[in-house]
Image: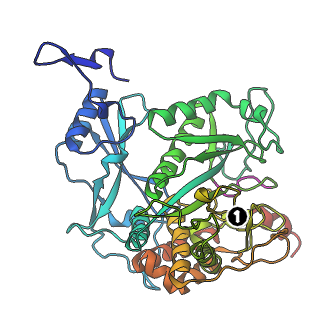
Amino acid sequence: MPPEKKEVRPSSRGGRARTPAFLKNERGVKNWKEASAWLEWRGIEDIECITPDQAGVARGKMMPSKKFTSNTSLALPSAVFMTTISGGYPEDGNGFHYPEDDGDLKLLPDLSTLTVVPWEEDPTAAVICDLVHQDGRSVEFTPRNVLKRVLAAYDERGLKPVVAPEIEFYLVRKNPDPDYPLTPPVGRSGRPIGGGAGYSIAGVNEFDELIDDIYHFSERQGLEIDTLIHEEGAGQLEINLRHGNPIELADQVFMFKRTIREAALKHEIYATFMAKPIQGQPGSAMHIHQSVLDKKTGKNIFSAEDGSETDAFFHFIGGMQKHVPNALVMFAPYVNSYRRLTQQASAPVNNKWGYDNRTTAFRVPRSDPAARRVENRIPSSDANPYLALAASLACGLVGMNNKIKAEPPVLTTANADEIDLPRGLLEAVGLFEDDTELGAILGKSFAATYTAIKRAEFETFMEVISPWEREYLLLNV
């Protein structure tokens, strides 16, 4: 925090001038002049200029704050956004072509995201950046730009989406050797955490000091947590964020993941956003609540003046039902993701919808008409938040554009028999490639790049021999 003597300063008239309000902002400034003052007021020494890659991993550069504010040109190789989660690169083909020159992409800091990095010992700040080509054109295949492209399509129709993500994750013991299964951590009671602690306050209290750090780190960065609960899994927690602009919420999820991991490491445990980290335990989701406002009136277009549901509401759901199965690779991006999507569980394998029905893929929570929304329960917590939001909103927009009729709501259990979703990564990639309407909204360059990466990741996974194979095949076949 800044020293007390900087709260006020002498004015030219001999009085004491108040500190400008923007200096006290925990998150964001309006321009470079404010950025320089904000950094100086806090004594910031280093800046992390970061941007999410296709996996949602923070990539970028660190530099002294004086260099950051001196009109320095920032760039990253384009290959950074064509890399698999294991650090490899896909082969050319199916519309994807690796750039021969591996040219640089320019980083453009979004100063509205400027914030401190509270876990660093030296005074450090971070800013999220967009990517443009050297001539200033937006880079179509980078995740933040993909979401902006979808929002622009809404804007053309005079619409403004509003979202609220819910992110589940596990706390686990440190696991330096990936050959060993993950295990729940030991809480303040001295015992390993067990399952079945959904909404248990005692379960949350097992990690009081860690959760205090999560709240503290979040407050220092201007990140707003709505609620925090213990989920059903052993050491599984969930954070709910307040509703708002999709870019701002995707930025918050991006920063929250970093924050939670750092807070956990401070307490000698891991935080993981794997979709299914522990066998026999529930998977982790990133549920997305969505509504759409009319830009002129600010009213929810899912509700009519009399409070009833509108055609737009049903068309949005219809688009989700038709196109979300084709976009599953953006909600379930890894082989592990499909272990979470199972029958007889609250992680859906259907494309049904219902009122307050948690067994359906698309749940309409109980609310007043102004807050009417559609919850997409399919995304895993391992999904890139920018891409998951982009895909979900794109599916709803296609539904409204094409006036796709929703099926009748399901009033009973929907996740017991039918399987409406792809059961594996390669099948999901194929469906995604074939959906030209989604590809047009998300961008052909992105679609080709993303599917090439997912195919390469699948081939890397196939090189690994699993314990199941050694147990059942080694001596039996």
Q: Position of residue 274 (x, y in %)?
A: 64, 55
Q: Dominant secondary structure of the magenta stretch? A: loop
Residue 275 is one of the magenta-drawn residues? yes
Q: Quadrant of the N terminus?
A: top left
Q: Position of residue 259 (x, y in %)?
A: 52, 40
Q: Is residue 87 visible?
A: no
Q: Residue furthest right?
A: 476
Q: What residue is rendered at 75% in x and 41% in y?
A: 184
Q: Position of residue 473 (x, y in %)?
A: 83, 71
Residue type (three-letter) at the residue carrying disc 1: Arg
Q: Position of residue 137 (x, y in %)?
A: 26, 70
Q: What residue is rendered at 60% in x and 56% in y?
A: 371
Element on which disc 1 rests: strand
The image quarter containing residue 419 is: bottom right
The local crowd at label 1, few if under 14, some if 14 to 19, many if 20 or more residues have their Cα within 10 Å, is many
Residue 245 is one of the magenta-drawn residues? no
Looking at the image, which is closer to me, 173 or 318? 318
Q: Is 276 left, or right, of 72 in this rendering?
A: right
Q: Is 270 left, or right, of 86 in this rendering?
A: right
Give the residue pinned by disc 1.
363
Q: What residue is rendered at 15% in x and 18% in y?
A: 11
Looking at the image, which is closer to me, 300 or 50? 300
Looking at the image, which is closer to me, 160 or 46? 160
Q: Quadrant of the C terminus?
A: bottom right
| Way the structure is coloured | rainbow
**Magenta residues (range):** 274-279
Q: What residue is rendered at 62% in x and 33% in y?
A: 211
The image quarter containing residue 20 is: top left
Q: Is 412 left, or right, of 97 in this rendering?
A: right
Q: Residue furthest front?
A: 306
Q: Is residue 429 visible?
A: yes
